[in-house]
Amino acid sequence: MAGFWLVYRRWQRDRLVSTAAWTVGVVITVVATAAFYPSLSGLSGDSAGSSAAMSSLLGLGQGIDPTSPLGYLWIALYANVYPWMLMALGVVLGVAAIAGDEDTGTLEYLLSKPVTRSTVVLARYLGMVTILGLVAAVSGLSLVVSYPMFGLDDDVTTTAPDGATVTSAGATATDAFNGTLSSFAVAVGLAGFAFLLGAVLGRKGPALGIATGAGIGGYVFYTLSNLTGSLEPLTWISPWRWYVADAMLVKGLTWNVVLPFGTALAGLALGWWGFVRRDLRNP
């Protein structure tokens, strides 16, 4: 057990600077997006979502008002930018966990010490999830802190074309938790796949390319299928189907949020199985 925590802490320490940089970058993006709400909240719902296809793609065709605090945060941040940032970090961490050190030869040095391959796999995987979770938690908290600064926690009343008025509730800490957790779920699922590739292939370049392609490909496949209506029954293979449809930032958590965690655990199990049964590759 001591060897496990030694490997875990060392990997965390080696990534202290990069973790801080990622955290600051994501926080700045989140707060900067929130800061634009006062200037954009006055747009009409029609101008904010004039394209029916685009509205459907962003989950706006289900009673989500893009001029409300939650609607704005969804369309400007949580429907695209925020999960993509976490997914990018997840791919980087997942590939680096095994393949990164194997490429440089430092993994061979680590395994020459009294630690098993299983210990390294579990410690690095936990380290990956820890860093990803830390960045998600800090950025989600920064959004909550920025609510009162930009009026995101205020109720908003809008007038429909027929003269009816609708009052939308302001954003709450629970909303931020729901949205951040669902984004983290998508990211950790892709991170688990990247970890699997790195553990099995032992090469950073191919693992990074395949994992990135899978992340982008899943989004493009969902987007094109949603816009054209073709192959729509197959969109279940993309996490974006439930992520956009459920819009958990706005509608609350659903059981679909656990699906990517299953993918992440499968990545751990298959990555461990492949890594302990192969020889290390020469750098």
Image (cartoon, grey):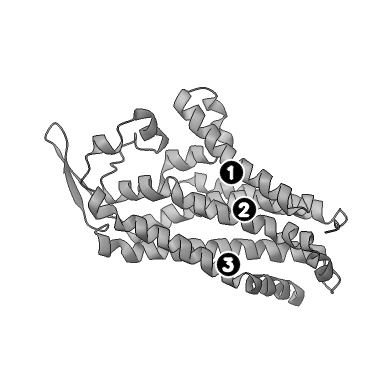
Residue farthest to the left, as pictured? 163
Q: How crowded is mark 3: few (under 14 residues within 10 Å), some or many (20 or more)?
A: few
Residue 173 versus residue 156 in the image, above or below: below
Q: Which residue carries the number 3 mark?
A: 18
Q: Which of marks 2 and 3 is nearer the N terminus?
A: 3
- Residue type for callout 3: Ser
Depth order, front residue of 267/90: 90
* Amino acid type assigned to the residue bearing label 1 in the image: Gly
Residue 212 at what x, y percent from top left?
62, 46
* Image quadrant containing the N terminus: bottom right
Tell me how far mark 2 sits from mark 3, CA to CA.
14 Å
Residue 180, placed above or below residue 16: above
The earlier-in-sequence mark between 1 and 3 is: 3
Secondary structure type for disc 2: helix
Q: Residue at x 43, y 63 (%)?
A: 27
Q: Mark 2 points at which residue?
A: 91
For marks 2 and 1, give the CA distance: 9 Å
Q: Residues within 10 Å of mark 2 (few under 14, many from 20)?
A: many
The residue at 84%/74% (across/down) is 113
Label 2 vs label 3, nearer the camera = 3
Residue lying at 46% horizontally and 60% vertically, measured from the top left:
26
Relative horizontal placement of residue 2, taking residue 168 as reference (left or right)? right
Cα distance in 3D space between marks 1 and 3? 22 Å
Mark sitting earlier along the chain (2/1): 2
Q: From the viewer's perspective, tell me whether residue 46 is left or right of residue 241.
A: left
- Percent across and percent down for residue 5 are 70, 74
Q: Which mark is residue 215?
A: 1
